Image (spheres, rainbow, N blue to C red):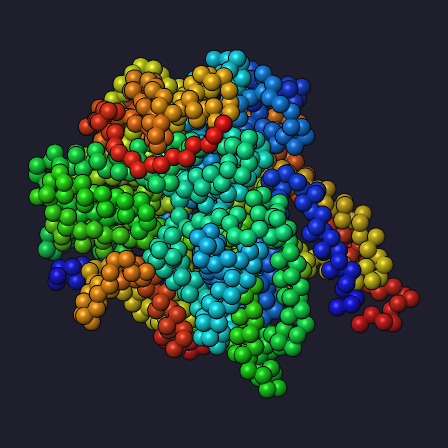
């Protein structure tokens, strides 16, 4: 037991959360006096059970003071949980920081985030979706894994077609499979991240600007995203810099490679000047580690090589070598408003980082849609979101294209370094410094979406 | 069979009326899961419990049946075939059977470790090829179908989960009945014999390999039926439904429920499905609890939950079951206190800044008092269990001693 | 091409010897107690995590010394308070117990250390290239890994065949009753063997953690492959485990290095298929793509044709 006591010390006394205020709790004796002053908040799990109970007992119509409940579906247990929990932290914090602490939205209603743990499994996603329907959650934020996003997209499409009046809206903040806003686009799905081909367009622009490069090696996980990265890198580099030779195009099974050194041997003997990879998680760290350990001094162009322990593990070895294409500029920050948001988040979650600030963008745009329509109905929100233009706290102009529900936003390429870093990652001193950026209007691409709109 | 008619009737009635009791979307969805997992776990028990074959790759037959069923749904939607989707589980079953005939032809030669390892290797190979052959398996995103096409079944189009439930319940009843009848056939009896003593079975003229092969094929058939039901219920299937995780899960279900009893896997499937769907909503640590529960079950209830219930058969025959109630209660109360305190400690250590509501108290990780209370409760609970255990053991011994009047006919 | 071959051999050797460190403990435990320990790779993971924590205070070498000790003690405790009780319920129960234990250890690691990748680094002492061949470095740390593995094999072989302890252990494998009758405490021997076996896995974890990254999934990645190695080598055979480890390591490494596959094979046979052929995925398959599953293929083939494994002499 002493081990449990010794670890996991709480870090901060700040507690401003006003969510989950509950009358059940005001009469209970408080053991923790410091806490009593801070506000009587229930934990989210408990509020969930009470919410479920309330739901089961009565299907009463929404009253003015009832909270607006938004679902957040991502892995919160299991191997992939670190990405999901950091996203949940950001979304909950953003809801408190921007709205709940300022009196709520739609005339005083609080926002409550309900976590739905899908364990990054398509099957569990279906189960959690049914739970969401049971608890009358009509808006679901979801990001991790395109396979899960595809499943959810199709599940929601079927559900909404079969259950008119109980529609559910999918707010996709991180799944980048292009088909979600192309062949498989849906009226009930909005994407707030740039899709893989948009990102690759910018990344290959950046690679093409480097005159010293003459050959590139592509390596990726053997699944749809890895293949999208490989195919489009070859295509786009072929258009932009036909003189750059693709000296390798390798796929490895996802999450099964113990040691990447055999792959790095191939990279080294191919004489590549740079490596492009769409790897994530442990596959990303192991690949980068093996490249570094083999003394191969080439830049690595990546999508997911930061935060959640990756930056700390690569540390000085990854300096000036890891380059990342992403939507959230980390350093230097453009506006004081965003700086304050980051600082406040760090004060509450010292061990966590704002890994996905587009979650805040997504939330703010959804709230704006609610305010404009004075409604929490998914259909009304969807109509408002279409072609919405929005200025983010970073001062960026965002545009949600109505035809395919794809958000356009500035894209950044950053490198891992410890110089000029105001907000580091993993408290390691190292962080991402932006080297290259592309404005919203330049990221706009064509789409093949034939959207079927529901009639109302 | 005649003697058991009331049991089967009760089973059918329960299946019919359960959705009226648990009628929320979530409730129906959990019931649907149960129908699938019960068939799957029962089919697994044909291998391990009845045939003595430990398999680490039983999900292969479940998954392959499921994949083919989703493709069949799509063929129905494209009007290549026209038949009612109510027959889809048969498609899954046929695929499971064919796969089992093929793989069983070489894997059932031996039992024990060799069989277990071949099943592990085959499982990994099939998973790997499922990611390579993306046309059929759909890569990591899997394949999707729609169950609402095809000719309606007496006007039912299976738009709602509740309609699917009754389809699943029907197949569950049929599959359970046939699996039970299988245990009564000579093949089923011989499977037990081969499990317990392969040499003797050989000596009386049976080919152990043939007996194992028959059980193996039957298990594949029913796993495929479960896979077909999965396809109808979820309208999609992915690689994870045939990988080692799913195989491991069905092993847990059968084991926790109790391998030696026909009803065991049913109990196990119900318990694990409930834990999986409900526990995860309340704690991020639910897998930790699941792991602990599983280990405790293996250590203390080696014959599973069904075995635990069956342990009371003698006491019941002795008409002394009543004498156990009080000692059980006296031990259970401190045990529950310990359990609650333990869960409280685990949760508190993960709370960080939030407050943990604990039976009307609000505990905070920063407060030493909170930790003290939980530790004290855990201590009291543990002590209570320790003190009350001898009395329980004595009561148990007494309850299992034959009473004077029926001492004669106790075996 | 020659350089690729040389490095593939070296890489295969490193992977193979790492596998051997795990397989040696597993096969020892199996030959002694008849338990296929599913949680063996979890003890490997525990080794890496304990070493990560300890290295913050005691440096890498402190971690290398103490982490395996801690892991060994945990292993011994598991045997004493868990396995021994379960033993009465038979082999399936034991197997299922270790299966559950693997699950629990993974959860416990996430509970105590979190889910992030851990920044566990190799000591600076080894931050140089042992040699440079064809412009590629072979890091000193990998050389160190090879040395440790060879040391373990030598020591184990010596202890088991040349020492009194080894003779008792070998005797209690084949004739536990006789050994007990001679006055030896067989349960104690079992506990110690389990402890030593898990400690060996711990050593593997300590030295593999820095190169193969320390994260909660590291046991799963290695878990079933160690099983495969032990079964291919023949259950209970130490030399078999060594041969199988190297075989599996080299097989995977060569398969990744070889840029051949179905297209080349079809070309040789003079066949060609349209890209719209329903089996297009099969016709474009190449060897590196399937490298990680080759050991499983080998396993199935070995078990079909020689159920005792390469060097084993018993099945159960």
Residue shown at 76%/49% (left/top)?
A: B328
Camera-nearest residue between C211 and C52: C211
In the rendered structure, the answer to whether residue A421 lies left or right of residue B348 reads left
Residue C189 in view in this figure: no
Q: Position of residue B355 (x, y in %)?
A: 56, 26
Q: Position of residue A351 (x, y in %)?
A: 39, 30
- Check the image and name the residue furthest to the right: B405
Residue A151 in view in this figure: yes
Camera-nearest residue between B247 and B326: B247
Residue shown at 30%/49% (left/top)?
A: A221
Q: Tell me the quarter of the image containing the C terminus of chain B.
A: bottom right
> Is the residue A161 above or below the residue C182 in the image?
above
Residue shown at 51%/32% (left/top)?
A: A167
Camera-nearest residue between A261 and A263: A263
Q: Tell me the quarter of the image containing the N terminus of chain B.
A: bottom right
In the rendered structure, the answer to whether residue A386 lies left or right of residue B174 reads left
Q: Position of residue A411 (x, y in %)?
A: 25, 28
> Is the residue A426 above or below the residue A398 in the image?
below
> Is the residue C232 above or below the residue C130 in the image?
below
In the rendered structure, the answer to whether residue B335 lies left or right of residue A102 reads right
Counting labels gives 0
Camera-nearest residue between A368 and B37: A368
In the rendered structure, the answer to whether residue B104 lies left or right of residue A191 reads right
Q: Position of residue C106 (x, y in %)?
A: 46, 48
Residue shown at 81%/59% (left/top)?
A: B316
């Amino acid at each position: 037991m002493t081990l449990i006591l010794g670890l996991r010390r709480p870090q901060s006394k700040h507690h401003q959360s006003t969510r989950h205020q509950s009358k059940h709790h005001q009469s209970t004796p408080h053991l923790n006096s410091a806490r009593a002053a801070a506000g009587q908040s229930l934990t989210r799990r408990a509020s969930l059970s009470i919410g479920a109970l309330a739901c089961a007992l009565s299907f009463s119509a929404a009253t003015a003071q009832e909270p607006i409940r938004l679902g957040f579906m991502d892995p919160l247990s299991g191997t992939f949980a670190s990405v999901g929990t950091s996203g949940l932290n950001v979304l909950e914090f953003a809801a408190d920081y921007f709205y709940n602490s300022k009196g709520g939205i739609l005339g005083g209603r609080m926002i409550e985030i309900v976590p739905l743990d899908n364990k990054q499994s398509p099957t569990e996603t279906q189960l959690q979706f049914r739970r969401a329907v049971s608890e009358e959650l009509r808006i679901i934020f979801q990001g991790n894994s395109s396979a899960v996003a595809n499943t959810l997209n199709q599940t929601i499409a079927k559900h909404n077609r079969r259950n008119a009046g109980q529609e559910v809206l999918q707010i996709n903040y991180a799944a980048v499979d292009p088909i979600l806003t192309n062949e498989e686009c849906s009226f009930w799905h909005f994407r707030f991240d740039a899709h893989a081909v948009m990102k690759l367009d910018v990344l290959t622009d950046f690679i093409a600007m480097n005159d010293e490069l003459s050959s590139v090696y592509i390596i990726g996980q053997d699944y749809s995203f890895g293949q999208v990265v490989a195919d489009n890198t070859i295509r786009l580099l072929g258009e932009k810099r036909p003189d750059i030779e693709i000296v390798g195009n390798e796929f490895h099974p996802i999450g099964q490679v113990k040691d990447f050194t055999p792959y790095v041997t191939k990279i080294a003997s191919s004489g590549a000047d740079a490596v492009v990879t769409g790897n994530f998680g442990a596959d990303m760290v192991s690949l980068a580690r093996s490249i570094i350990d083999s003394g191969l001094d080439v830049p690595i162009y990546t999508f997911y090589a930061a935060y959640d322990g990756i930056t700390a593990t690569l540390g000085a070895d990854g300096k000036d070598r890891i380059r990342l294409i992403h939507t959230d500029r980390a350093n230097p920050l453009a506006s004081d408003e965003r700086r304050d948001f980051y600082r406040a988040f760090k004060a509450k979650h010292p061990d966590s980082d704002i890994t996905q600030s587009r979650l805040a963008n997504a939330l703010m745009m959804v709230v704006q849609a609610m305010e404009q329509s004075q409604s929490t109905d998914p259909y009304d929100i969807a109509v408002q979101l279409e072609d919405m233009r929005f200025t983010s706290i970073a001062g960026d102009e965002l545009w949600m294209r109505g035809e395919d529900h794809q958000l356009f936003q500035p894209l950044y390429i950053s490198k891992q370094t410890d110089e000029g870093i105001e907000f580091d990652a993993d408290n390691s001193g190292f962080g991402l410094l932006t080297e290259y950026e592309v404005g919203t209007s330049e990221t706009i691409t064509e789409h093949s979406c034939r959207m079927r709109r529901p009639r109302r | 069979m005649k003697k058991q008619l009331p049991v089967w009737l009760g089973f059918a009635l329960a299946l019919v009326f359960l959705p009226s009791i648990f009628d929320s979307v979530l409730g129906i969805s959990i019931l649907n899961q149960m129908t699938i997992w019960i068939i799957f776990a029962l089919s697994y028990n044909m291998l391990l419990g009845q045939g003595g074959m430990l398999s680490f790759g039983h999900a292969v037959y479940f998954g392959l049946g499921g994949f083919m069923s989703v493709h069949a749904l799509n063929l129905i939607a494209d009007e290549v075939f026209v038949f009612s989707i109510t027959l889809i589980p048969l498609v899954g079953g046929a695929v499971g059977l064919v796969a089992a005939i093929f793989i069983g032809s070489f894997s059932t030669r031996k039992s024990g470790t060799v069989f277990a390892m071949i099943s592990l290797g085959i499982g990994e190979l099939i998973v790997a090829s499922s990611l390579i052959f993306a046309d059929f398996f759909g890569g990591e995103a899997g394949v999707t179908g729609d169950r609402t096409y095809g000719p309606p079944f007496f006007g039912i189009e299976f738009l709602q989960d509740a309609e699917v439930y009754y389809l699943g319940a029907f197949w569950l009843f049929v599959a359970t009945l046939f699996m039970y009848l299988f245990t009564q056939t000579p093949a089923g009896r011989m499977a037990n014999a081969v499990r317990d003593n392969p040499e003797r079975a050989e000596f009386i003229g049976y080919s152990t390999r043939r007996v194992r092969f028959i059980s193996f094929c039957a298990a594949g058939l029913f796993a495929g039926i479960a896979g077909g039901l999965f396809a109808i219920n979820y309208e999609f299937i992915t690689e994870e439904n045939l990988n080692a995780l799913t195989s491991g899960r069905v092993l847990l279900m059968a084991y926790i429920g109790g391998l030696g009893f026909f009803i065991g896997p049913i109990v196990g499937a119900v318990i694990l499905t409930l834990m999986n769907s409900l526990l995860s909503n309340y704690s991020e640590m639910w897998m930790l609890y699941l792991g602990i529960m599983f280990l405790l079950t293996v250590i203390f209830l080696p014959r599973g939950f069904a075995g635990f219930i069956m342990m009371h058969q003698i006491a019941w025959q002795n008409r002394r079951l009543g004498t156990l109630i009080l000692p059980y209660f006296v031990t259970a109360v401190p045990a529950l206190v310990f359990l609650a305190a333990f869960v409280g400690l685990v949760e508190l250590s993960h709370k960080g800044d939030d407050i943990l509501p604990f039976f009307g108290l609000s505990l905070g990780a920063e407060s030493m008092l909170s930790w003290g209370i939980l530790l004290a409760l855990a201590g009291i609970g543990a002590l209570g269990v320790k003190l009350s255990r001898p009395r329980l053991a004595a009561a148990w011994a007494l309850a299992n001693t034959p009473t004077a009047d029926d001492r004669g006919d106790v075996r | 091409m020659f350089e690729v071959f040389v490095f593939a051999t070296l890489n295969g050797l490193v992977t193979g010897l790492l596998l051997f460190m795990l397989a040696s403990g597993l096969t020892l435990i199996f030959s002694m107690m008849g338990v296929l320990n599913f949680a063996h790779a979890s003890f490997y993971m525990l080794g890496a995590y304990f070493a990560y924590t300890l290295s913050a205070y005691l440096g890498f070498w402190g971690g290398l010394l103490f982490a395996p000790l801690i892991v060994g003690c945990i292993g011994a405790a598991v045997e004493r308070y868990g396995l021994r009780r379960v033993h009465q319920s038979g082999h399936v129960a034991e197997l299922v117990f270790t299966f559950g234990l693997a699950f629990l250890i993974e959860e416990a690691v996430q509970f105590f250390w979190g889910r992030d990748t851990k920044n566990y680094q190799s000591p600076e002492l080894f931050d140089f290239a042992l040699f440079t061949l064809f412009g590629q470095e072979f890091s000193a740390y990998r050389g160190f890994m090879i040395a440790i593995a060879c040391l373990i094999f030598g020591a184990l072989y010596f202890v088991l065949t040349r020492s009194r302890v080894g003779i008792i252990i070998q005797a209690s494998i084949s004739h536990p009753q006789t050994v007990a009758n001679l006055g030896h405490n067989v349960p104690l021997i079992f506990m110690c063997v389990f402890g030593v076996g898990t400690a060996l896995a711990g050593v593997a974890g300590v030295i593999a953690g820095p190169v193969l990254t320390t994260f909660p999934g590291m046991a799963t990645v290695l878990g079933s492959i160690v099983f495969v190695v032990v079964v291919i080598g023949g259950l209970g055979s130490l030399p078999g485990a060594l041969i199988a480890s190297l075989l599996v390591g080299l097989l995977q490494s060569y398969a990744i290095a070889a840029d051949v596959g179905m297209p080349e094979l079809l070309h040789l046979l003079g066949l060609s298929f349209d890209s719209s052929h329903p089996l297009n995925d099969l016709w474009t398959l190449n060897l590196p793509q399937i490298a990680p599953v080759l050991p499983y293929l080998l396993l199935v083939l070995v078990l079909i044709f020689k159920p005792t494994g390469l060097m084993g002499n018993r099945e159960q």
